Amino acid sequence: MAKHPMRTRLKTTSSAPAMELWFESKQPEDLLAPLARAAAMLFATVDRKRVRKCDQCVLHFHDTSKKGTRRWCSMQLCGNRLKVAAYAARQRKN
Ligand SMILES: [Zn+2]
């Protein structure tokens, strides 16, 4: 974050001035600025025990489930893959 900082500027709109985050993109590594900020915001604002790595892919996610036992990043992607694999494993046993 220190090497690739996000900056704040005052933006004028038709209704009222507003604050806006931005970053300078002089070199490819500067694109890390919004990623680093988003990761820092995540770890600073949520219970870290609820930030976990997905069982099926490289992604990490914030578990907002009631029980706090979610194991995949997205039901549509990895959750479905996991359930299909579990179903196939059950079928092989029978
Ligand atoms: Zn995943």
Image (tube, rainbow, N blue to C red):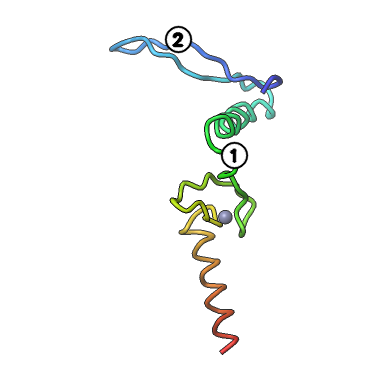
Q: Give whichever of 35, 93 is nearer the camera.
A: 93
Q: Give whichever of 63, 88 is nearer the camera.
A: 63
Q: Is residue 5 left or right of residue 69?
A: right
Vertical relation: 7 (above or below) 43: above
Ligand 1 shows up in which quadrant of the image?
A: bottom right
Tag 2, which secondary structure? strand
Quarter of the image with the C terminus is bottom right
* Rendered residue at 64%/51% (across/down): 58
Vertical relation: 4 (above or below) 57: above
The residue singled out by tag 2 in the image is 10
Question: Could you say where residue 18 lies in the image, as x and y percent from the top left?
Answer: 39, 13
- Mark 1 or mark 2, earlier in chain: 2
Question: Could you say where residue 39 lies in the image, as x and y percent from the top left?
Answer: 60, 33
Q: Is residue 77 left or right of residue 27?
A: left
Vertical relation: 30 (above or below) 77: above
Q: Give whichever of 77, 28 is nearer the camera.
A: 77
